Image (cartoon, rainbow, N blue to C red):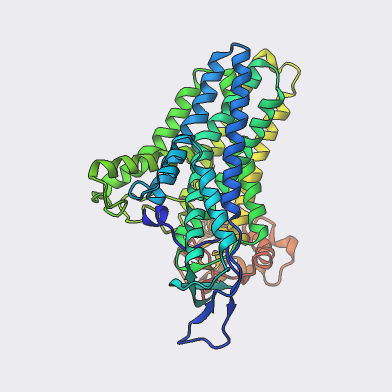
Amino acid sequence: MEKMSDATENEISDQQRYQPSPQPQNGVDFVSDQSKIQPPFSVVIATVLYCAEFVSAAIICSQYNEEDDHFWMGLTITFMLVPSVLTQLALTFIHRDLGRDRPLVLFLHLLLLGPLIRCLEALVIYFQAGRKEEPYVTISRKIKLKKGRGTPVEWEVGHSERKLAAHRNAFKRTAVIQAFLGSTPQLTLQLYATIQDKILPDARAVLIAITLVSITYGALVCSVLAIQIKYDDYKVRLRPAAYLCMVLWRGLEIATRTVALVLFSTALTFWVVPVVLGNLLFFFFLPWAEFWRRRAPLPENIEKNLSKLGTVVVLCLVTFLYSAINMFCWSAVQLNLADRDLIEKQMSWGRLALYYAARFAENVFLVVMWYLFKTDFYEYVCTPLVALQLVVGYSLAVLFMMLFYQYCHPCRWLFRHNVADGLRCVCCRGCCRADAHRRRRRPGARAAPGPHEPAGRMRDGPFRRRQGRGLSGSFRGDPSGLVVAVRPVVAAATGLPELAFCCCGHGRSGKLPG
């Protein structure tokens, strides 16, 4: 939890450009802080989204009050105040202001203006940095990745840089809280109110747009934080193509999921309650079930002054945030309450695939139920086209997710297996199944090679039959011939050898860090 709450100098999105020294020392490149500190863009963006959503929600509440619509007004105020209070508590907890003499800051937090004063502090630190030479606080050591090769790098971290890193890390975590505990229920509520009222006022349209941007930004920050926590020993940098791919992935995923829930709620209003509660309870108790199965003690490094009850309360809040994120999109992390960092460092492709398969099936089920029990409001709407757009939109989100992990992930060189390996594994399994079935039908044929046999024995199957036969002949009565023909194309696209090993046991990817 220290890596999630403490201020660290490790940043991914706001990396400084350092000038390496020409001579490495003991195999480690030393770089000095000779460049200007990068502006705290993440702090400004989070503050602007917080203020914009709060002001737009207040305006729509005043309109609900004028129309005597107290039900929508009460829900809007609830989804406006609850995340704001949680944001103030998170900022106070991360910066440890309770043990410091800062009455003005605490008073502004009580007025729900904590993000504003924190943003002003970060801007003041940024504009005052570099005016006078200051000694460095510590020396940071990381491994710089470039085309699969790791180079140890160390550099000096000054006071201003460390303070800005503290503000960046705090605002990234509050952006996630604001997005998934405030913006997602607010967006769902306003969309539902729009369908029920059959009108979209300008103020509500602005609030819907701001909440959608806030959720997308929160999901983007969540993905960046997952990379930062999992690969804490590496100094990596996300490229613009990676950000673009993540924005498309997260935006489509959240938009289609939210619209599917809203449409289902308009057709079957009371049945949406067990759907939402089932998702929340499942993802809330999943980390605790694994924690109880391991019979591990509670982590003791969350906060020194917390008792066991306080530790349990903090863990419950973290788990609730985790469940709220997973209800709308993939959280990109797996909680491990038995670990001192609360995060599982290994990449679980199985859980990722299972999550998106189950979420896709659930979204299709919600859309089908809406199509069967839709109200008269959709009489003049092409409902089959809407359902098709939702399914295609979520499929595109999964496609952009696969492209990100295959080509745009900054630490893809460290993956033991990647997306191409998984697809190649499926192809190999289909190839071996077809070859085993064909050999069983032949009298006196030996058994098909097992999944862990050497690659040389595999060449007795489709690779040998490919020799001396045309491309069209390889498909005749041989389903595995299609796999053999596609393999060179996959190899050219992924940059791996044609006979590269795959993750099912027939082989492995050769892309490991140098």
Query: Which one is nearer the viewer's eye here, 104 or 23?
Result: 104
Q: Residue visible at 55% across and 66% down? A: 236
Count of labels in the image:
0
Residue 167, image x, y percentages: 49, 54
Quarter residue 60 falls in: top right
Q: Is residue 174 visible?
A: yes
Asked if residue 84 is positioned above or below residue 232 in the image, the reply reads: above
Residue 497, image x, y percentages: 62, 72
Q: Residue visible at 64% across and 68% down? A: 465
Asked if residue 213 is positioned above or below residue 376 in the image, the reply reads: below
Residue 101, image x, y percentages: 36, 49
Q: Is residue 122 left or right of residue 339?
A: right
Residue 61, image x, y percentages: 59, 22
Q: Is residue 374 visible?
A: no
Query: Which one is nearer the viewer's eye here, 191 or 16?
Result: 16
Q: Is residue 345 left or right of residue 22?
A: left
Asked if residue 176 is positioned above or below residue 81 in the image, the reply reads: below
